[in-house]
Image (cartoon, rainbow, N blue to C red):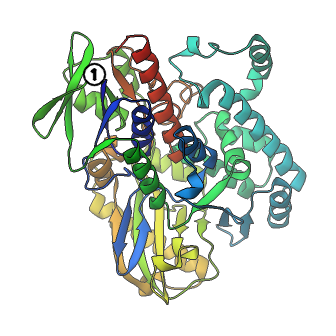
Amino acid sequence: MRVAVIGGGLGGLAAAARLARAGLEVTVFEQNPAVGGKAAELRIAGCRFDTGPSLLTMPQVVDDLFTDLGERREAHLRLRPLDVLCRYQFADGAVLRSCPDAGAFGDRLAAATTDTAEAVVRYMARSETLYRLAADFFLYRPIAGWASFGSGISPAKGLWALRQLPRLGFGQTMHGLHRRHFRDPRTIQLFDRYATYTGSDPHRCPATLALIPHVEHRLGACLVEGGIYRLVEAVRDLALRQGVRLQTKTRVERIVTRNGRVRGVTAMGETFDFDAAVSATDMNTTYRKLLADCPSGLGARQMRRPLSSSALVFYWAMRGEYPQLDIHNIFFSGDYRREFEELRQGACPVDPTVYVYRSCGYVRSDAPVGHENWHVMVNAPPDTGQDWRAEVERTRGRILSRLGSALDMDPALAIVEEGLLTPPQIETRTGSHRGSLYGPASHGATATFLRQPNRSRDIAGLYFCGGSVHPGGGMPLAMLSGALAARQVLEDAAGGRP
Protein backbone atom coordinates (compact mmCIF):
# COMPACT_ATOMS: atom_id res chain seq x y z
CA MET A 1 0.00 0.00 0.00
CA ARG A 2 1.35 3.42 -0.99
CA VAL A 3 0.65 6.43 1.23
CA ALA A 4 1.37 10.11 0.59
CA VAL A 5 1.94 12.34 3.61
CA ILE A 6 1.45 16.00 2.73
CA GLY A 7 3.57 18.19 5.00
CA GLY A 8 6.74 17.48 6.95
CA GLY A 9 5.79 18.92 10.31
CA LEU A 10 6.03 16.81 13.46
CA GLY A 11 2.52 15.40 12.97
CA GLY A 12 3.24 14.30 9.41
CA LEU A 13 6.64 12.85 10.28
CA ALA A 14 5.20 10.92 13.23
CA ALA A 15 2.43 9.47 11.04
CA ALA A 16 4.88 8.59 8.27
CA ALA A 17 7.28 6.83 10.64
CA ARG A 18 4.53 4.68 12.13
CA LEU A 19 3.11 3.74 8.74
CA ALA A 20 6.50 2.81 7.33
CA ARG A 21 7.23 0.73 10.42
CA ALA A 22 4.07 -1.26 9.58
CA GLY A 23 5.44 -2.03 6.12
CA LEU A 24 3.64 0.59 4.02
CA GLU A 25 5.39 2.51 1.25
CA VAL A 26 5.36 6.11 2.49
CA THR A 27 6.41 9.36 0.83
CA VAL A 28 6.45 12.69 2.68
CA PHE A 29 6.04 15.79 0.49
CA GLU A 30 7.36 19.01 2.05
CA GLN A 31 7.23 22.34 0.22
CA ASN A 32 10.17 23.87 2.09
CA PRO A 33 13.86 22.93 1.82
CA ALA A 34 13.71 21.45 5.34
CA VAL A 35 11.06 19.69 7.40
CA GLY A 36 9.56 20.94 10.64
CA GLY A 37 6.64 23.14 9.64
CA LYS A 38 6.24 25.82 12.30
CA ALA A 39 9.09 24.25 14.30
CA ALA A 40 11.85 25.68 12.10
CA GLU A 41 15.08 27.50 12.85
CA LEU A 42 16.80 30.72 11.75
CA ARG A 43 20.40 31.86 11.89
CA ILE A 44 21.37 35.54 11.84
CA ALA A 45 24.36 37.49 13.17
CA GLY A 46 25.90 34.36 14.67
CA CYS A 47 22.69 33.51 16.57
CA ARG A 48 20.45 30.48 16.15
CA PHE A 49 16.70 30.80 16.78
CA ASP A 50 13.87 28.32 17.15
CA THR A 51 11.33 30.19 15.03
CA GLY A 52 8.16 28.60 16.41
CA PRO A 53 7.54 26.37 19.45
CA SER A 54 9.93 26.95 22.33
CA LEU A 55 8.85 24.44 24.99
CA LEU A 56 8.13 20.71 24.87
CA THR A 57 5.32 19.46 27.12
CA MET A 58 4.05 15.87 27.41
CA PRO A 59 7.51 14.39 26.63
CA GLN A 60 6.01 10.92 27.05
CA VAL A 61 4.47 11.37 23.59
CA VAL A 62 7.96 11.60 22.10
CA ASP A 63 9.17 8.64 24.16
CA ASP A 64 6.19 6.57 23.01
CA LEU A 65 6.95 7.27 19.35
CA PHE A 66 10.49 5.97 19.65
CA THR A 67 9.46 3.02 21.84
CA ASP A 68 6.67 1.98 19.48
CA LEU A 69 9.19 1.93 16.64
CA GLY A 70 11.67 -0.20 18.57
CA GLU A 71 14.12 2.50 19.62
CA ARG A 72 15.06 4.50 22.70
CA ARG A 73 14.58 8.23 22.56
CA GLU A 74 17.55 8.75 24.88
CA ALA A 75 19.88 7.33 22.22
CA HIS A 76 18.96 10.12 19.81
CA LEU A 77 17.57 13.05 21.77
CA ARG A 78 18.18 14.48 25.23
CA LEU A 79 15.48 16.27 27.19
CA ARG A 80 15.95 18.34 30.32
CA PRO A 81 13.10 19.21 32.72
CA LEU A 82 12.73 22.88 33.53
CA ASP A 83 13.21 24.11 37.08
CA VAL A 84 11.67 27.51 36.26
CA LEU A 85 8.79 27.23 33.81
CA CYS A 86 8.48 30.94 33.18
CA ARG A 87 9.39 34.34 34.60
CA TYR A 88 6.22 36.44 34.74
CA GLN A 89 6.36 40.22 35.09
CA PHE A 90 3.07 42.03 35.59
CA ALA A 91 2.19 45.54 34.50
CA ASP A 92 2.74 46.83 38.05
CA GLY A 93 6.29 45.44 38.07
CA ALA A 94 5.66 42.40 40.28
CA VAL A 95 7.73 39.37 39.25
CA LEU A 96 6.85 35.70 39.73
CA ARG A 97 8.84 32.64 38.67
CA SER A 98 6.64 29.58 38.23
CA CYS A 99 7.89 26.07 38.96
CA PRO A 100 6.54 22.55 38.35
CA ASP A 101 5.62 21.65 41.95
CA ALA A 102 2.12 22.90 42.80
CA GLY A 103 2.91 23.51 46.46
CA ALA A 104 6.06 25.51 45.80
CA PHE A 105 4.34 27.40 42.99
CA GLY A 106 1.47 28.21 45.32
CA ASP A 107 3.89 29.60 47.88
CA ARG A 108 5.56 31.79 45.26
CA LEU A 109 2.24 33.05 43.95
CA ALA A 110 1.00 33.79 47.46
CA ALA A 111 4.12 35.88 48.06
CA ALA A 112 3.57 37.89 44.87
CA THR A 113 -0.23 38.30 44.92
CA THR A 114 -3.15 38.42 47.34
CA ASP A 115 -4.18 34.82 46.53
CA THR A 116 -3.29 31.88 48.74
CA ALA A 117 -1.13 28.83 48.15
CA GLU A 118 -4.13 26.67 49.02
CA ALA A 119 -6.14 28.24 46.19
CA VAL A 120 -3.40 27.28 43.73
CA VAL A 121 -3.27 23.69 45.01
CA ARG A 122 -7.07 23.37 44.72
CA TYR A 123 -6.99 24.79 41.21
CA MET A 124 -4.21 22.44 40.09
CA ALA A 125 -6.23 19.50 41.42
CA ARG A 126 -9.16 20.69 39.27
CA SER A 127 -6.82 20.97 36.31
CA GLU A 128 -5.68 17.38 36.84
CA THR A 129 -9.28 16.14 36.92
CA LEU A 130 -9.99 17.90 33.64
CA TYR A 131 -6.92 16.33 32.08
CA ARG A 132 -7.85 12.82 33.26
CA LEU A 133 -11.28 13.16 31.65
CA ALA A 134 -9.88 14.57 28.41
CA ALA A 135 -7.09 11.99 28.18
CA ASP A 136 -9.44 9.02 28.49
CA PHE A 137 -12.19 10.31 26.24
CA PHE A 138 -10.42 12.65 23.85
CA LEU A 139 -6.67 13.10 23.56
CA TYR A 140 -5.63 9.52 22.85
CA ARG A 141 -8.68 8.42 20.88
CA PRO A 142 -9.97 9.20 17.39
CA ILE A 143 -13.14 11.28 17.57
CA ALA A 144 -15.66 11.54 14.74
CA GLY A 145 -18.55 13.34 16.45
CA TRP A 146 -20.43 12.91 19.71
CA ALA A 147 -21.45 9.33 18.97
CA SER A 148 -17.83 8.20 19.05
CA PHE A 149 -17.09 9.46 22.56
CA GLY A 150 -18.36 6.34 24.32
CA SER A 151 -17.01 3.72 21.91
CA GLY A 152 -14.44 1.37 23.38
CA ILE A 153 -14.90 2.66 26.94
CA SER A 154 -15.72 0.23 29.75
CA PRO A 155 -19.11 0.67 31.47
CA ALA A 156 -17.42 1.43 34.79
CA LYS A 157 -15.28 4.18 33.29
CA GLY A 158 -18.23 5.47 31.31
CA LEU A 159 -20.31 5.78 34.48
CA TRP A 160 -17.46 7.57 36.24
CA ALA A 161 -17.17 10.00 33.33
CA LEU A 162 -20.88 10.74 33.28
CA ARG A 163 -20.71 11.69 36.94
CA GLN A 164 -17.77 13.96 36.19
CA LEU A 165 -19.30 15.71 33.15
CA PRO A 166 -20.58 18.70 35.13
CA ARG A 167 -16.96 19.34 36.15
CA LEU A 168 -15.71 19.25 32.56
CA GLY A 169 -16.36 22.95 32.14
CA PHE A 170 -18.59 23.10 29.06
CA GLY A 171 -20.94 25.57 30.70
CA GLN A 172 -18.43 28.26 31.70
CA THR A 173 -15.48 30.06 30.21
CA MET A 174 -11.89 29.61 31.24
CA HIS A 175 -11.85 33.19 32.55
CA GLY A 176 -15.05 32.52 34.51
CA LEU A 177 -13.49 29.46 36.15
CA HIS A 178 -10.41 31.45 37.13
CA ARG A 179 -12.52 34.22 38.64
CA ARG A 180 -14.18 31.61 40.83
CA HIS A 181 -10.87 30.18 42.01
CA PHE A 182 -8.86 33.39 42.48
CA ARG A 183 -9.42 36.99 43.53
CA ASP A 184 -6.21 38.75 42.43
CA PRO A 185 -6.45 39.99 38.79
CA ARG A 186 -2.79 39.10 38.29
CA THR A 187 -3.38 35.45 39.22
CA ILE A 188 -6.39 35.33 36.90
CA GLN A 189 -4.33 36.86 34.09
CA LEU A 190 -1.54 34.34 34.60
CA PHE A 191 -3.86 31.35 34.30
CA ASP A 192 -5.94 32.97 31.53
CA ARG A 193 -2.76 33.01 29.46
CA TYR A 194 -2.96 29.23 29.00
CA ALA A 195 -5.83 29.76 26.53
CA THR A 196 -3.27 31.19 24.12
CA TYR A 197 -1.62 27.75 23.96
CA THR A 198 -4.51 26.95 21.58
CA GLY A 199 -4.66 30.44 20.06
CA SER A 200 -7.92 31.11 21.90
CA ASP A 201 -9.49 33.86 24.00
CA PRO A 202 -9.93 32.91 27.70
CA HIS A 203 -13.14 34.94 27.78
CA ARG A 204 -14.65 32.78 24.99
CA CYS A 205 -13.12 29.32 25.29
CA PRO A 206 -14.57 26.67 27.63
CA ALA A 207 -13.17 26.05 31.09
CA THR A 208 -12.17 22.61 29.82
CA LEU A 209 -8.91 24.16 28.62
CA ALA A 210 -7.94 24.68 32.25
CA LEU A 211 -6.39 21.21 31.89
CA ILE A 212 -3.36 22.88 30.27
CA PRO A 213 -1.69 24.03 33.52
CA HIS A 214 -1.66 20.39 34.69
CA VAL A 215 -0.01 19.38 31.41
CA GLU A 216 2.74 21.97 31.83
CA HIS A 217 3.31 21.67 35.58
CA ARG A 218 2.85 17.95 36.18
CA LEU A 219 3.31 16.03 32.91
CA GLY A 220 6.63 17.61 32.15
CA ALA A 221 7.87 20.84 30.60
CA CYS A 222 11.20 20.17 28.94
CA LEU A 223 14.05 21.78 27.12
CA VAL A 224 15.44 19.93 24.14
CA GLU A 225 19.22 19.75 24.29
CA GLY A 226 20.51 21.70 21.31
CA GLY A 227 17.20 23.48 20.76
CA ILE A 228 13.69 22.55 19.64
CA TYR A 229 14.79 21.87 16.08
CA ARG A 230 16.84 18.91 17.32
CA LEU A 231 13.49 17.25 18.08
CA VAL A 232 12.42 17.76 14.46
CA GLU A 233 15.70 16.28 13.22
CA ALA A 234 15.41 13.30 15.56
CA VAL A 235 11.87 12.47 14.39
CA ARG A 236 12.85 13.03 10.76
CA ASP A 237 15.80 10.65 11.09
CA LEU A 238 13.60 8.12 12.87
CA ALA A 239 11.19 8.20 9.92
CA LEU A 240 14.02 7.81 7.44
CA ARG A 241 15.33 4.78 9.33
CA GLN A 242 11.89 3.19 8.94
CA GLY A 243 12.15 3.61 5.18
CA VAL A 244 10.14 6.80 4.66
CA ARG A 245 10.93 8.60 1.42
CA LEU A 246 11.25 12.36 1.90
CA GLN A 247 10.76 14.85 -0.94
CA THR A 248 11.52 18.43 0.09
CA LYS A 249 11.01 21.51 -2.10
CA THR A 250 7.94 19.70 -3.42
CA ARG A 251 4.61 21.48 -3.06
CA VAL A 252 1.48 19.33 -3.34
CA GLU A 253 -1.13 21.19 -5.36
CA ARG A 254 -4.00 18.73 -5.36
CA ILE A 255 -5.22 15.50 -3.82
CA VAL A 256 -6.48 13.38 -6.72
CA THR A 257 -9.78 11.61 -6.07
CA ARG A 258 -11.99 9.44 -8.20
CA ASN A 259 -15.31 7.81 -7.33
CA GLY A 260 -15.08 9.05 -3.75
CA ARG A 261 -11.61 7.73 -2.91
CA VAL A 262 -8.01 8.94 -3.01
CA ARG A 263 -6.06 7.98 -6.12
CA GLY A 264 -2.94 10.10 -5.77
CA VAL A 265 -1.53 13.61 -5.47
CA THR A 266 -0.37 16.23 -7.93
CA ALA A 267 2.89 17.93 -6.95
CA MET A 268 4.92 20.39 -9.00
CA GLY A 269 2.68 19.67 -11.99
CA GLU A 270 3.21 15.90 -11.91
CA THR A 271 0.65 13.33 -10.71
CA PHE A 272 1.75 10.43 -8.49
CA ASP A 273 -0.40 7.39 -7.77
CA PHE A 274 -1.17 6.61 -4.11
CA ASP A 275 -3.71 4.45 -2.31
CA ALA A 276 -4.15 6.88 0.56
CA ALA A 277 -3.14 10.38 1.60
CA VAL A 278 -2.52 11.86 5.02
CA SER A 279 -2.84 15.64 4.94
CA ALA A 280 -0.54 17.05 7.59
CA THR A 281 -1.04 20.58 6.35
CA ASP A 282 -3.64 23.00 7.68
CA MET A 283 -7.20 21.70 7.53
CA ASN A 284 -8.51 24.87 5.85
CA THR A 285 -5.76 24.76 3.25
CA THR A 286 -6.51 21.10 2.55
CA TYR A 287 -10.17 21.78 1.83
CA ARG A 288 -9.73 25.12 0.09
CA LYS A 289 -6.78 24.21 -2.15
CA LEU A 290 -5.95 20.52 -2.22
CA LEU A 291 -9.62 19.46 -2.41
CA ALA A 292 -11.02 22.52 -4.18
CA ASP A 293 -12.75 20.35 -6.80
CA CYS A 294 -14.15 17.89 -4.23
CA PRO A 295 -16.79 19.56 -2.01
CA SER A 296 -17.22 18.30 1.54
CA GLY A 297 -20.13 19.02 3.85
CA LEU A 298 -17.98 18.55 6.96
CA GLY A 299 -15.21 20.62 5.40
CA ALA A 300 -17.63 23.45 4.71
CA ARG A 301 -18.75 23.43 8.35
CA GLN A 302 -15.18 23.32 9.64
CA MET A 303 -14.14 26.21 7.40
CA ARG A 304 -16.89 28.42 8.84
CA ARG A 305 -15.38 28.22 12.31
CA PRO A 306 -13.45 31.30 13.55
CA LEU A 307 -9.69 31.00 13.35
CA SER A 308 -7.25 30.93 16.23
CA SER A 309 -4.81 33.78 16.66
CA SER A 310 -1.58 34.27 14.78
CA ALA A 311 1.64 35.92 15.92
CA LEU A 312 4.14 38.63 15.19
CA VAL A 313 7.63 37.40 16.01
CA PHE A 314 10.86 39.40 16.10
CA TYR A 315 14.18 37.58 16.22
CA TRP A 316 16.71 39.89 17.79
CA ALA A 317 20.44 39.23 17.93
CA MET A 318 21.20 41.24 21.07
CA ARG A 319 24.44 42.80 22.22
CA GLY A 320 25.03 42.22 25.93
CA GLU A 321 23.94 39.63 28.50
CA TYR A 322 20.79 39.79 30.60
CA PRO A 323 21.00 37.50 33.64
CA GLN A 324 17.84 39.04 35.15
CA LEU A 325 15.85 37.12 32.53
CA ASP A 326 15.07 33.41 32.45
CA ILE A 327 14.78 31.17 29.41
CA HIS A 328 11.03 31.84 29.10
CA ASN A 329 9.69 35.27 30.05
CA ILE A 330 6.25 36.87 29.94
CA PHE A 331 5.64 40.61 30.28
CA PHE A 332 1.91 41.01 30.84
CA SER A 333 -0.23 43.82 29.46
CA GLY A 334 -2.22 46.05 31.77
CA ASP A 335 -5.62 45.06 30.31
CA TYR A 336 -5.86 41.46 29.11
CA ARG A 337 -9.53 41.64 28.12
CA ARG A 338 -8.88 44.63 25.89
CA GLU A 339 -5.98 42.78 24.29
CA PHE A 340 -8.25 39.95 23.16
CA GLU A 341 -10.99 42.36 22.05
CA GLU A 342 -8.48 44.10 19.77
CA LEU A 343 -7.34 40.77 18.35
CA ARG A 344 -10.98 39.87 17.65
CA GLN A 345 -11.33 43.16 15.77
CA GLY A 346 -8.37 42.23 13.55
CA ALA A 347 -5.77 44.56 15.05
CA CYS A 348 -2.54 43.99 16.94
CA PRO A 349 -3.02 45.05 20.60
CA VAL A 350 -2.11 48.56 21.67
CA ASP A 351 -0.71 47.17 24.93
CA PRO A 352 0.46 43.65 24.03
CA THR A 353 1.61 40.90 26.33
CA VAL A 354 5.20 40.18 25.27
CA TYR A 355 6.91 36.79 25.32
CA VAL A 356 10.72 36.60 25.27
CA TYR A 357 12.48 33.25 24.74
CA ARG A 358 16.26 33.07 25.14
CA SER A 359 17.46 29.64 24.08
CA CYS A 360 21.02 30.82 24.78
CA GLY A 361 20.07 30.40 28.43
CA TYR A 362 20.58 26.64 28.00
CA VAL A 363 22.23 26.31 24.58
CA ARG A 364 25.06 28.78 25.07
CA SER A 365 26.30 28.30 21.52
CA ASP A 366 23.03 29.76 20.20
CA ALA A 367 24.58 33.23 20.59
CA PRO A 368 28.17 34.53 20.45
CA VAL A 369 29.94 35.40 23.68
CA GLY A 370 28.64 38.70 24.99
CA HIS A 371 25.39 38.40 22.99
CA GLU A 372 21.95 36.80 23.32
CA ASN A 373 19.26 35.56 20.97
CA TRP A 374 15.81 36.96 21.81
CA HIS A 375 12.76 35.35 20.23
CA VAL A 376 10.16 38.06 20.94
CA MET A 377 6.51 37.24 20.22
CA VAL A 378 3.13 38.91 20.63
CA ASN A 379 -0.31 37.61 19.75
CA ALA A 380 -1.63 38.89 16.42
CA PRO A 381 -4.87 38.42 14.48
CA PRO A 382 -5.00 36.19 11.41
CA ASP A 383 -4.31 37.92 8.10
CA THR A 384 -7.44 39.50 6.65
CA GLY A 385 -5.67 42.08 4.51
CA GLN A 386 -4.25 44.35 7.21
CA ASP A 387 -1.39 46.72 6.41
CA TRP A 388 1.24 44.49 8.00
CA ARG A 389 4.09 46.91 7.37
CA ALA A 390 2.27 49.48 9.53
CA GLU A 391 1.25 46.84 12.09
CA VAL A 392 4.84 45.65 12.42
CA GLU A 393 6.17 49.17 12.85
CA ARG A 394 3.59 50.07 15.52
CA THR A 395 3.94 46.78 17.37
CA ARG A 396 7.73 46.90 17.34
CA GLY A 397 7.60 50.30 19.03
CA ARG A 398 5.14 49.04 21.64
CA ILE A 399 7.32 46.02 22.42
CA LEU A 400 10.44 48.14 22.79
CA SER A 401 8.60 50.52 25.10
CA ARG A 402 7.20 47.67 27.23
CA LEU A 403 10.53 45.87 27.56
CA GLY A 404 12.42 49.10 28.14
CA SER A 405 10.12 50.04 31.00
CA ALA A 406 10.12 46.54 32.52
CA LEU A 407 13.89 46.03 32.31
CA ASP A 408 15.04 49.64 32.78
CA MET A 409 17.01 49.69 29.53
CA ASP A 410 16.69 50.67 25.89
CA PRO A 411 16.55 47.36 24.01
CA ALA A 412 16.63 49.11 20.63
CA LEU A 413 20.26 50.10 21.27
CA ALA A 414 21.24 46.46 21.82
CA ILE A 415 19.72 44.98 18.63
CA VAL A 416 22.50 43.93 16.27
CA GLU A 417 20.29 42.35 13.62
CA GLU A 418 16.60 41.51 13.31
CA GLY A 419 14.52 38.77 11.75
CA LEU A 420 10.75 38.92 11.38
CA LEU A 421 7.77 36.58 11.03
CA THR A 422 4.30 37.91 10.19
CA PRO A 423 0.92 36.18 9.67
CA PRO A 424 1.22 36.34 5.85
CA GLN A 425 4.71 34.82 6.08
CA ILE A 426 3.42 32.07 8.38
CA GLU A 427 0.79 31.18 5.77
CA THR A 428 3.34 31.17 2.93
CA ARG A 429 5.90 29.08 4.79
CA THR A 430 3.65 26.59 6.57
CA GLY A 431 0.35 26.54 4.67
CA SER A 432 -1.58 27.74 7.73
CA HIS A 433 -4.72 29.49 6.49
CA ARG A 434 -4.33 33.25 7.01
CA GLY A 435 -1.39 32.58 9.30
CA SER A 436 -3.57 31.10 12.05
CA LEU A 437 -1.31 29.07 14.33
CA TYR A 438 -3.76 26.38 15.41
CA GLY A 439 -6.55 26.29 12.83
CA PRO A 440 -10.02 26.81 14.35
CA ALA A 441 -10.14 28.55 17.71
CA SER A 442 -11.49 26.66 20.71
CA HIS A 443 -14.39 29.06 21.22
CA GLY A 444 -17.77 27.78 22.36
CA ALA A 445 -18.77 24.92 24.59
CA THR A 446 -17.86 22.06 22.23
CA ALA A 447 -15.38 23.52 19.74
CA THR A 448 -12.39 21.87 21.39
CA PHE A 449 -13.94 18.43 21.05
CA LEU A 450 -15.35 18.63 17.53
CA ARG A 451 -12.32 19.53 15.47
CA GLN A 452 -11.72 17.99 12.06
CA PRO A 453 -11.54 14.18 12.57
CA ASN A 454 -8.40 12.28 11.62
CA ARG A 455 -10.30 10.20 9.06
CA SER A 456 -12.35 11.83 6.29
CA ARG A 457 -16.05 11.04 6.31
CA ASP A 458 -16.42 11.93 2.63
CA ILE A 459 -13.38 10.49 0.86
CA ALA A 460 -12.06 6.95 1.37
CA GLY A 461 -8.32 6.85 1.89
CA LEU A 462 -8.05 10.46 3.14
CA TYR A 463 -6.74 11.20 6.63
CA PHE A 464 -5.76 14.32 8.58
CA CYS A 465 -3.14 15.12 11.20
CA GLY A 466 -1.36 18.18 12.56
CA GLY A 467 -2.20 21.06 14.86
CA SER A 468 -5.39 22.20 13.07
CA VAL A 469 -7.24 18.87 13.54
CA HIS A 470 -8.06 16.47 16.37
CA PRO A 471 -6.81 16.48 19.12
CA GLY A 472 -5.35 20.00 18.81
CA GLY A 473 -2.35 22.28 18.38
CA GLY A 474 1.14 22.22 19.83
CA MET A 475 3.95 19.73 19.28
CA PRO A 476 2.76 16.83 21.47
CA LEU A 477 -0.83 16.99 20.24
CA ALA A 478 0.31 17.26 16.63
CA MET A 479 2.38 14.10 17.15
CA LEU A 480 -0.61 12.41 18.80
CA SER A 481 -2.72 13.34 15.78
CA GLY A 482 -0.11 11.64 13.59
CA ALA A 483 -0.41 8.50 15.71
CA LEU A 484 -4.22 8.58 15.48
CA ALA A 485 -4.18 9.10 11.72
CA ALA A 486 -1.67 6.27 11.24
CA ARG A 487 -3.76 3.95 13.43
CA GLN A 488 -6.82 4.55 11.27
CA VAL A 489 -4.91 4.07 8.02
CA LEU A 490 -3.71 0.68 9.27
CA GLU A 491 -7.15 -0.31 10.60
CA ASP A 492 -8.73 0.51 7.24
CA ALA A 493 -5.98 -1.26 5.32
CA ALA A 494 -6.48 -4.39 7.43
CA GLY A 495 -10.22 -4.22 6.78
CA GLY A 496 -9.82 -3.53 3.08
CA ARG A 497 -11.35 -0.07 3.26
CA PRO A 498 -8.82 2.27 1.45
Whether 109 is drawn above or below 21: the answer is: below
Q: What residue is at 26 percent from the left and 30 percent from the top?
A: 288
Whether 322 is drawn above or below 350: the answer is: below
- Left or right placement of residue 322 versus residue 170 in this view: left
Q: What residue is at 60 percent from the left and 67 percent from the top?
A: 329
Q: Residue 21: percent from the left, percent from the top?
A: 44, 35
- Left or right placement of residue 438 versus residue 408 in this view: left
Q: Residue 121: percent from the left, percent from the top?
A: 85, 48
Q: What residue is at 54 percent from the left and 75 percent from the top?
A: 403
Whether 446 is drawn above or below 194: the answer is: above
Q: Residue 224: percent from the left, percent from the top?
A: 55, 61
Position of the N terminus by quadrant: top left
Q: Which image quadrant for residue 334?
A: bottom right
Q: Is residue 431 visible?
A: yes
Q: Amino acid at mark 1?
A: Asp
- Left or right placement of residue 390 versus residue 52 in this view: left
Position of the C terminus by quadrant: top left
Whether 163 is drawn above or below 75: the answer is: above
Q: What residue is at 80 percent from the left and 19 percent from the top?
A: 160
Work out whether residue 486 or residue 110 is closer to the camera in this orientation and state it: 486
For label 1, the SS is loop
**Residue with the mark numbered 1:** 275
